[in-house]
Image (cartoon, grey):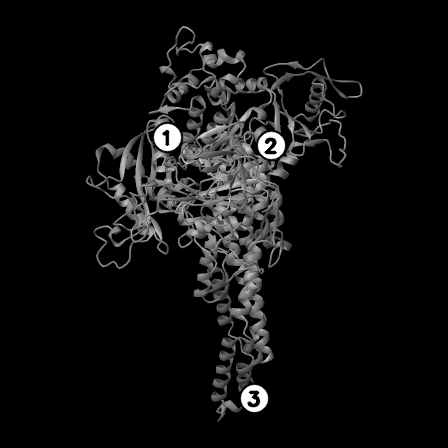
Amino acid sequence: MNTQFEKLVRLLKELFQLDQPDLDFGLYRIMHAKSAEVTQFLDENLLPQVNEAFSLYKTADKVDLEKELAKAIEQAQALGVPDPEAIPKVKELRAKLKDDAVDIGALENEVYDHLYRFFRRYYSEGDFLAKRVYKSGAYAIPYEGEEVKLHWANRDQYYIKTSEYLRDYAFRLRPEDERKPMRVHFRLADATEGEHGNVKVSEGKDRVFILAAPGESGCDFIAEEDGEQGKELVIRFEYRPATLTDWSDGAHAGKSKPPAQKDLSMLVAQRVLAVTDASLASWIAELSKPHVTVGGKKADYTRLEAHITRYNARNTFDYFIHKDLGTFLRRELDFYIKNEVMYLDDVENETTTRVEQYLSKIKVIRKIAGKIIAFLAQLEDFQKKLWLKKKFVVETQYCITVGCIPEAFYQEVADNEAQREEWVRLLGIDEINGDLTTPGYSKPLNPDFLKAHPTLVMNTQNFHEDFATRLLEAMGEVDQQTDGVLVHGENFQALLLMRARYRKQVKCIYIDPPYNTDASAILYKNDYKHSSWISLIENRITAALSILESDGILCLAIDDEEASEARQVLDSLFPKIVGIAVVRSNPQSRKTKGKFSPVHEYALFFGASPQSVPGSLEITEKRLARYPKEDEKGRFAWMNFIRTGNNDKREDRPKLYYPIFVAQDDTIRVPAMTWSSATGENGEYVLHESPRNKEIVVAPIDEGNGNPIEKNWHRGPDRVSTEPEEFRIRRDVNGKVSIDFKTRMDENSAPMTWWDHNEYASANYGAAELKSLFGHKPFDFPKALSLVVDCLRAANASPKATIMDFFAGSGTSGHAVIKLNREDDGRRKFIVVETGNCFDTVLLPRIKKVTFTPEWKDGKPKRLATPEEAERSPRIVKVIRLESYEDALNNLETRRTDTQQLLLDASDAQGADGLKEQYLLRYMLDVETRGSQSLLNVQAFTDPTAYKLKVRRPGSDESREVKVDLLETFNWLIGITVKHIAAPQTFSAAFERDSEKRLHLKGRLKQNADGPYWFRTVTGATPDGRKTLIIWRKLTGEPEQDNLVLDEWFTKQGYSAKDSEFDLIYVNGGNNLENLKTPDDLWKVRLIEEDFNRLMFEMEGA
């Protein structure tokens, strides 16, 4: 077999994601299902086209001509011809060999080699790197004449990694056993634990997964721990560059290089399966069993090896999705051909036949490469479509303070055991004792206890769905009362979903992204640490720009590791730098080797427009002490009216040198005078009156050292004349007069750039605040609450502002908003987004705790909220969870109908550029995954309560089937501000036909809890102010009956498509509601399915 051909085939299988048969997740799973068909296409259709393209040169094939020449000479010699070279046949063949012969084999090899070299240069471990090659070792970047150009290696790509797999990957050895599932965790060691022989993660060295150190026991890397469902097995890893010492003892000798990931994975399996601890025997036995593939076959490797391979792959492959791979590769191909294939000297100095052959080679390279690019673009664009699609809401909860709940629901709340247990666990209510006026804790709870503690946070997750729907209906204006939204999901996806609802409504965005230091590194492809970080930040801030108000401000917290990159990204996206604060966040400093020890980080403030201005910070005690006096105008301090410091001489500011007349009763006045620039060296005032009886003339003359110096006053004569109450007179023992003035504190002054409060120290205060709330440290590197509060103040987060944080972490920003509202009686709203496990373990509990009461110690309330604090607490906090990109991939299903297969198998569909080839190269994925649950299966809208997805648990490899919240998802897609969510209504109905066979209702609709006709409505307003009614219903499969019931129900509710109560009416399923066109030529009654599909896949700004 041709070596160049084999190399190319191996590369194409890698590019087409066919080379990892053990990876059964994401797009790999889909491509494996198509593996046989795509491989056959490669081997039997696409690459043979290279040979076919050169078939017209078969008569001039060098090998065949050489054989024919040898035969002619042999025949001449056999005939006894003295000089075989002289016969015409031999001469003709010699001439053909010289001028026209084509080495078809070499030509094919050249084509295969060029194809291999072209695609190899852009591809690395699952990702195409958008490097525009100019020449060997040099790259071109797009430059359009800007003064300063920001460019990074991954500029044309979406960064799609999250670090949740890196932190914690889990799977079940007995997935069918809910009681004892035998859950196994691969857990990454902390950053300090991850140091090995003082070897730190460094650029240019590949980071790999290495089993943690064996320790004294010889197997410290593995342990059984208590988990959510009984005992769990934890296997610890480090993520760092490998060293020679990472080889096993027997394999170390003679090795000159550290082990690669493949070697290390084998060592992990060997070491773990060799553990002899009797208490772990059942775990080791299960992990040693053969892996069972998706097809049900037993593999020749163990279950442990299968999961190690998957863990490595998830963190090694697929960091990016190219924004427009097809255009990029086609442009690069043209450049490659012009610079690497086509040489003008070859054209100038060759015969016409040779030039034709040369051009044919170029055409073949371009044609075959173009088809490969088409297939690669199909794969990448399909992933881009999944990445950019708005994600489903897979769960909605409401956390509601009981003071906002109608009292009619109190008994049900008090009777709920799950809610009571949550309050005991989180809020310590079992330690609340009653007195003569206030009821204490009891079991079961008493409704009076709820009334006495209005900040108790009730979570609808603890209740039956029916209770939640009735409560929401009773509460009315849902969005108006919602003071916080917590989103558990990938932040880029959350921003895409929320853009319609919050467009131009967020006053301040505060984010504290990963600093990308060793302690908080993002997942990045080796050698692309900073570039990956820039793509992560740029992608998400760009998605958030449309959410900011026109004068909004973004604040980004960062340290020196990525400060330069962050500044450049923000400079390129925002028109105004509002300010850069240097924050003394680590007074003890951080130990470093060979460098300064940092004690600071930064808060970068950038404005959405030139009108973006900062707010002022809270006035500190230290600053108040500088202004100890107070009058009706505010705080002030007395200060000598004679200026000191810079520009304090008469010649510096001559118009500030003038006399003041001081009377015996200490009143002052400025005499009538005019300025004369012609008098004196620098001009002076000409007086038009003399002092009155007993008035003293005072001028700004400093006589402190015995040498009088003419200076100037702090203010001009007009201010002295109009504000005499701002001055006072002092007389010394000798009667000498001094004038003081009130220097006032500017309560609205802009923040300074040096922030050095002790409370900003996150390592001290941030950690202590969480320990007070939880009794332990549940989160690494939490921000100090005071620092985030001041960042929000500096970002001008006014009392009615909406604040967003899409790197929410432990939830400090949400906590900060609650604190600010309690301080100034504001009604700020917060939206926070977090993807990690800390959402459930830290962020959500934190918001519940600080809503209940502001002060905590060792995980227990120090006191209860005051009535004023209760009144200023959040009312409703909505919690939503989103489908992830991984979920979208894992819910894909491929379907090819018999009709489609017949068309593809037809004889006229075969061959180069035929229908089958075009289908495989360009359309197969999009067509055959259509109707997958994650790609919107509109057929499943017949029952809006039963649309299901398989959703992966955070930080694990386990999936469970959940019901999608279609109602909530659609609300976000159209951006509706919800006014009312009705509880479902169900009806039964009887039907009859008249003499003309027309269907009618027999009697009236009857409300019936078990009836087949289900309705639920949402009302509100779209972002452009249209009053909207959304009608969700269950369809029975009998359209005539369904629509008859809809018409009757619609009329019974008092609705009409003709009146002006609603501007838009949405209904799922085909219907007969009367439809009218709105003034902007749009239909008033619309199908939910149509707009759902359009909005879900709309790629705004993609």
Indicate the amino acid at tag 3.
Answer: Pro
Q: Which residue lies furthest to the front in this view?
A: 693
- Percent position of residue 306, x then y: 36, 43
Q: Can residue 1101 be seen in this view?
A: yes
Residue for point 49% across, 41% down: 555
| Mark 3: few/some/many CA within 10 Å (<14, 14-19, 20+) | few
Quarter of the rendering occupied by the N terminus: bottom left
In depth, the one of 323 and 734 nearer the eye is 734
Marks 3 and 1, how far apart at CA: 100 Å
Mark 3 element type: helix
Tag nearer the camera, 3 or 2: 2
In depth, the one of 442 and 1082 nearer the eye is 442
Task: Residue 769: give its label.
Answer: 1
Q: Quadrant of residue 359?
A: bottom right
Judging by the rendered image, the residue that carries numbered circle 3 is 88
- Percent position of residue 247, x then y: 25, 52
Indicate the amino acid at tag 2.
Answer: Phe
- Percent position of residue 377, x then y: 55, 53
Judging by the rendered image, the residue that carries numbered circle 2 is 970
